[in-house]
Image (cartoon, coloured by chain):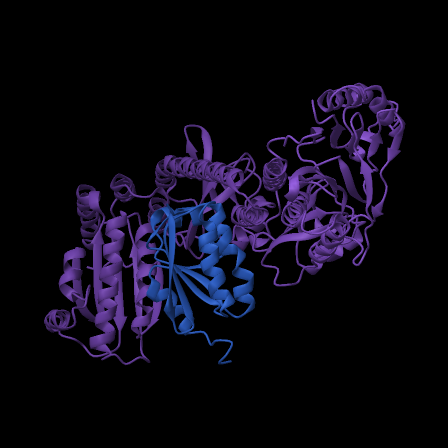
Amino acid sequence: MSEVEPPPDAILTVPSRTEFLGSVRAVAARLAAEAGFEPTAVDQMALAVDEATTNVIRHAYRSAPDRSLEIHFRSTAAEFRIDLLDDGLQVEAAAVPRYELERYAREGRRGGMGVHLMGQIMDSVRFAQREGRNVCCLVKRRPAAGGHATATRRYRGVVEALAGAGSEPGSALRELVALHELLAAVAAGGEPEALLGSALQLVCRELGARGGAIFERVDQERFRLVRRSGETAAEVELAVPPPVFPVTAADGPPWAAALESAGLRQLHPLRLGREVVGLLAIGERSGGEGRDAGLLAGLTGILGPLVAAQTLRGRLKRADRTLEARVFQLRNLFDLTRELTASLDEGTVLDLVATTLLGHLGVTRCAIFLREGSALTLACQRGLRGRCRGALPAGTRLPEAAAPTSELDDPELRAALEEARLDFAVPLRTEGLIALGARPAGRPFGEEDVEFAATIGAQALTALESIRLNRVRLEKQRQDRELEIARDIQVGLFPRARPSFPGLELAAVSRPCHQVGGDYFDLIRLPEGRLGVVVADVAGKGVGASILMASVHAALQARAGTVEPGALIGWLNEFLCSSTRDNKFVTLFYAEIAAAGGAATYVNAGHVPPFLVDASGDGERLTTGGPLLGVLPGARFETAVRQLGPGSLLAVVTDGVTEQLSPREEEYGDARVLGLLRRCRGAGAEPVVEELLRELTSWAGAGGCTDDVTALIVKGVSRET
Amino acid sequence: MNELSVDARQLGEITVLYPRGYVNAHTTRILEGALRNAIDAGRYRIVVSGAGLAYIASAGLGALLGVIEELRGNGGDLRLADLNATVVNIFEMLGFHHLYRIYPSELEAIASFADEPTEASK
């Protein structure tokens, strides 16, 4: 009995080196999967082929690396068969397993369990000799095919027995067996695509065709090649649906050319109900055309629903994929947004945007430019390898919408991006630009991609903006905290209790215009019952000014009364000149008032001249002294003496008093201070201070204060009262 | 808590990275840092051995894509090995399996470099 031996579906020629085992496994697994086996069976068969190949290399070729073996794969409706052909030593099958098992035990090698394992996995393992070569034949039968396959074999046996007996079996019987075999394959199940493959082989065999192809319908106009066999070309394009079936090469263009170039002769419709869902194309038939109309009708009748199932499955799979990809991308966006919101620095935001863009679009190069002043600066890049300019010049015109680099208006920008091999530009409002490298396989940037890039870009801008605002807020907080510290320092410097002093009434106020001022006053008890009086205005505000003020305070507290006032202030000037930086200076008035008689020795270092009004109302300004402090090293300071008799009033103020502006921007002025002192000279020191503050407040009106206000009032009173 | 750790092992000229955990927008900088370390040390042959890699988001794929130009431009490559089904599915879904060479095992990925002369030995 002659065995029906279809040509192998695939032949793999492998060098006799174990490095190729991985490839052998991969090919075997792929073909087994295409033949419709379950993943576990696929893995096992790949392992069996690996073992069989290892055997050939180790035993037939004794590990000689310069030989090769052939592996033939055949998939039929009933079974999957793998033949390994070598021309090495013939190996006793029985000798193999023990050797391998010993080796397994000795080397602890995993997986090398040889023929035993192959026997366990495959339905049959046979060793034979064919045409002078060793053949190891591995067969795995299709799982559910049992009953049908047996029946088919039995029917075929009958047909062949009849043929052997010299009687021509009726064509009807032959058709019946063929149809049964196809149905058996369908009943055995498996991947529709693999099923179509074995069905096509069967159809070609039964029709005696040299090749064939099955197409599925893509839409009204197009068909896609699903499976081909025999001498059919790999690329077949079918564009227009055929009007009348069957279509043959004789029908002329557009079919003739397409069919002929593919080595095909006839097209038959595959239907589900009345709808054409696919095409069966067959090549030249050995028995001539036109016979077996009944068989053809039967076969296409079975293939129709199969193709429809395959098409549906494909669509579902694609829809599934699209959906899956969508879910993945949404998840990424969510992930990204959460991360952007939590990012605290620009670098993190930009890195994240860059990697997400690359990962989402599958590109390997990108650049993000951001506006910095008038220029665009390269803020972040990936994959550019130093080929990109760090900045684009001030006049660079950003595109209004996303566009390929080649379509950009600005020649400078176009050149810069081309240099860096960045093919596509997405503007970020007027604030920046995202530029992207080519997509894999030359795919263009679609609308969705552009939208994605623009969306993440916008999110990045928002995140960058909020980081910037956050930084401003933190800076403000820092300043506030600094001012608070400064105020604490200042408050600590002002005298806590007003010292009572025989023959004098003292009152003072210092009111900062904002949180922290630069004004300072002090009252210092000196030896021999004398009193030191200080009013000063320190340049600047904040912690710096407060520390300078604290230096003045400490220096005077330490040295006052130990030297005469002119020398004291000269020393203070030297101290400030050597210890302060530029733009730090102090205006200061200092007086020492003697215990008896109220004689005051004063120095005015660049300060607003104090006002002295005597009991009769005559006024004077105290100007003797020298320049402001901390600027001119070596400056000399003169002193003068004035009597603070009963009824006289000394007012030491800062420029916040004399220069307070009215809503009409007019200064309060020296004359008004003097007028107020004259008017109030009968009153005590405290009421004078209160009156001065009241007047200043009403003078300022709605405009509010313009500078810190400090006033120290010393009133001479009779010692008896 | 970090959802990702990346250990590195040096095998001759080949750097093998072992990401363990999830690579998402938050953790991608860890992966990028590990890649960066290798590149900054002049090592352009990198195998990412993914047995411990549970999931990779776009940002993580971007970290892998972002170094490709530099690696290949210096005669190296980034190859993947031992990826679980979830991760393989992500690569296939996005069509990224065409961008990398992916091997079933770490050993095969490492061996794949062995057949290629290095820049130094050329």
Q: Give the camera-side residue of B121 and A630.
A: A630
In this view, B25 is above or below B77: above
- Residue at image position (13%, 63%) is A116
Residue A706: where, in percent of width, then height?
A: 78, 30
Residue A322: where, in percent of width, then height?
A: 47, 38
Furthest toward the front, the residue is: A720
* Residue A359 appears in the figure: yes
> From the viewer's perspective, is A218 left or right of A252?
left
> From the viewer's perspective, is A492 left or right of A46?
right
> From the viewer's perspective, is A216 left or right of A653?
left
Q: Give the camera-side residue of A677 and A264.
A: A677
Res A679 → quadrant: top right
Image quarter of the N terminus of chain B:
top left
Q: Give the camera-side residue of A614 and A111.
A: A614
Q: Give the camera-side residue of A119 and B104.
A: B104
Number of numbered callouts drawn: 0
Residue A187: where, in percent of width, then height?
A: 26, 39
Which chain is in blue here?
B
* Residue A23 appears in the figure: no
Residue A5: where, in percent of width, then height?
A: 28, 59
Res A392 → quadrant: bottom right
- Residue at image position (42%, 74%) is B115
For chain A, give the colour.
purple
